[in-house]
Amino acid sequence: MPDIVVTGLGATTPVGGDVASTWAAVTRGASGVVSLTQDWAEQLPVRFAGVLAVDPSEVLDRVEVRRLDRSQASALIASREAWADAGAPEVEPERMGTVVGTGIGGVITLLDAYDVLKERGPSRISPHTVPMLMPNGPSAVVGLDRHAAAGVHAPVSACASGAEAVAWGAKMITEGRADVVMVGGTEAPIHPLTIAGFASMRALSTRNDDPPAASRPYDLARDGFVMGEGAAMLVLERADHARARGARIYATFAGAGMTADAHHIAQPDPEGHGAARAMRAALDAAGAAPSDVVHVNAHATSTPQGDIAEAIAIRSALGENTTAIVSGTKSMTGHTLGAAGALEALFTVLALHHRLAPPTINIDELDPQIGLNVAANTAQALPEGDLLAVNNSFGFGGHDVALTFRSRS
């Protein structure tokens, strides 16, 4: 089975318009959560979100912006950065693939088009509407941009979609279908309907008076997640292919575990059984022991039940006395839904590359039920040597995905 390495990274997030600005913001503990200023936000019970720091219209040309849903535009921006970061490798189209996940696809396009249909009639619907709203649209747009003929895939697994994309992209390489695969996730969900829907479930924080402090994983006073938007992309490459062209290597993809809770459509298994099994499977795929893990980028959404269930799962998979440093980066970016797994995989890779675990901000009083070595409010250094890190992602429907990465040896 070929070794797989990460050679390129790209992102556009609530804390930065590219990887460099995003990583700098995250490691210093800056929040990208802001109050929503649109008129429609005034009627909502939740009036804040993690909004892109740089609007796609500032990066793409006018024609691209008009023909792409915001989720597709964000994915395209991140993929172009990742490709350039990887050194624009020369690869035959038949050996190039894309796997880009999303939780809900072009929801803004769909809802806006329905408003046009009701108010102005069917003749005013854009011919670009269907390609813009398709959940596979982001992967297709990235695939067309990269001339990817090995395969263009789009996992839709709620908030685990981006992590599943990384796992399936690696599988394309191990199966011999591709030498290079662009993998990642994207989401652009900030709309009154989606916010109202999540608020109706009581899933969102209601700290309208202090948005930057609203996302607070592991804090005793956490009251729900914060919706965010963004995209993150990683270039996965067969290791011998990367070394032959002298590519810079950030980290090695070590393995993935994918399971399901089979418990509830929206609530996690309170004992974290599926999540723990996913982590164990990822460790087995990496040929690693629980004690090898030095860092975990946790799903850590800031919901009262979810954070505890994941903490139980981490202790179950890694041992009750694990010393792995745990980061909850949604405290800064908000929860980017289908993009979250890819964005946090990117953070995991950078943590290994820079030997630095990002902080979990907004922790005033650590919930005593967590029982983990949380990087509370301040980034923490990782040790020297060969390191192994885990990235967890879970989604409505009971999707559980764990990814493992090794530092470059």
Image: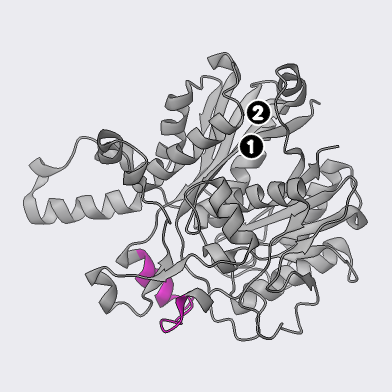
- Across and down, in percent, residue 252 comes to 77, 37
Residue tagged 2: 172
Image-quadrant location for residue 97: top right
Give the residue at x 79% y 58%: 295
Per the rendered image, the range of residues in magenta is 194-211
Image-quadrant location for residue 235: top right
Quadrant (top left/top right/bottom left/bottom right) for the N terminus: top right
Residue 210 lies within the magenta run? yes
State the residue in front, 222 or 12: 12
> Which amino acid type is shown beneath numbered disc 1?
Trp
Quadrant (top left/top right/bottom left/bottom right) for the C terminus: top right
Residue 383 lies within the magenta run? no
Residue tagged 1: 168
Distance CA(mark 1)–CA(mark 2) = 6 Å
Q: Is residue 286 above or below residue 238?
A: below
Residue 102 seen in this snapshot: no
Give the residue at x 54% y 30%: 84
Q: Is residue 301 above or below residue 345?
A: below
Whether residue 128 sits left or right of residue 378 in the image: it is left
The 10 Å Cα crowd at callout 1, few under 14, some 14 to 19, many 20 or more, is: many
